[in-house]
Amino acid sequence: MNKALRARESRCDAAPVWRRSLCIRTLNACAIVVALLLGLAALVVLRRISVVASESERVGTAYVECLGSLRLIVGLLLAVVLLVIVANALLVVRPLASYARRVKDGEPLVPTGASELQSLADAYNATYRENRARTLHLRRAAEHDPLTGLYNRGAYDMLLAEHTHDVALLLIDVDRFKAVNDGHGHDVGDAVLKKVATAIARSFRSTDYPCRVGGDEFAVIMTGVGSQLKGVVAKKAERMAEALSDTSDGLPEVGLSIGIAFGEDHQDGEGLYRAADRALYQAKQRGGNGFAFAGEGGVAGSGEQSAC
């Protein structure tokens, strides 16, 4: 969960104490009690009017006084009713409308309104955070290779379908990996694959997509890159090879064969892949441990050209 989301949820959880203390049940109960008391007062006034009416000599003055009291009571009753309507609108209706909008937009709730609704928002936000964390965990597990932590083949296929222009596709094979597995065992082979994955991930930007697409096959989708940046791409290939040439960790040295193609030369991801695959074949035909660009006959690598 990113920092912006955590900050937004923190704001949603924070509500002034006075707002959290407003309970619509208490408010409505108080309004009902006041209304009952005013109703009893009205009955008393009406009773007085009926008593006074039997005494003819006092009817005029007493009737006017009682009528004034009755008007006051009715006015207070109307004020109480209006208060209840406004309170319910502010503490129930408006918060529920806000909650509905946020739920529809998939956002956490801002606790507001009556305390019951704020408790509901707190419970929803707790469930929201749990579900989001679970979703992110499942999505990462579904999109990433468990051994190397890079994007897996399924994620690679989706990413390549989404990014076909202004991209560079690098297809990477680990040279001599079968010999490493056969000679040193699968544990060492796994350690070598992790080392390769680390070298790839550290050589590219956060906006690029390093993937493991097979046993010893990797790929990188570089975004915002055109053929005019071939030199930049070549330096990244050289950086990966330099990292793998360091055997101070006790792991056997391996090389990389890399085929590179640019999206501007192809209509779709399939065409881009085929071009990069042909370039990879050229690099391997020259003995591996090098890279080749699609559409170019030369291969850079150890031996004839500059080291990969």
Image (cartoon, grey):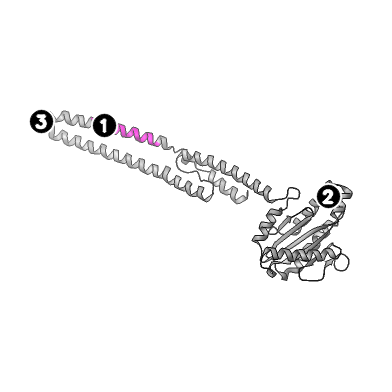
Q: In the rendered structure, find residue 56 and report the number of the disc placed on it.
A: 3
Local secondary structure at mark 2: helix
Q: Residues within 10 Å of mark 1 (few under 14, many from 20)?
A: some
Q: Where is residue 38 in the image (x, y as percent from the top left)?
A: 29, 33
Mark earlier in primary sequence (2, 1): 1
Mark earlier in primary sequence (3, 1): 1
| Residue at which label 1 appears | 41
Which residue range is magenta in the image?
Answer: 27-43
Please determine whether, in this image, residue 152 is positioned above or below residue 58. below
Q: In this view, does 308 lie to the left or right of 117?
A: right
Callout 2–callout 1 Cβ contact below 8 Å: no
Residue type at mark 1: give it.
Ala
**Disc 3 to disc 1, C-alpha distance:** 24 Å
Q: In the rendered structure, find residue 295 and report the number of the disc placed on it.
A: none
Residue type at mark 3: give it.
Ser
What residue sits 29% from the left and 38% below the top?
77
Please determine whether, in this image, residue 163 is positioned above or below residue 134. below
Q: Is 270 inside the magenta-drawn segment?
A: no
- Please identify the residue farthest to the left as the structure is shown: 57
Q: In the rendered structure, find residue 189 and report the number of the disc placed on it.
A: 2
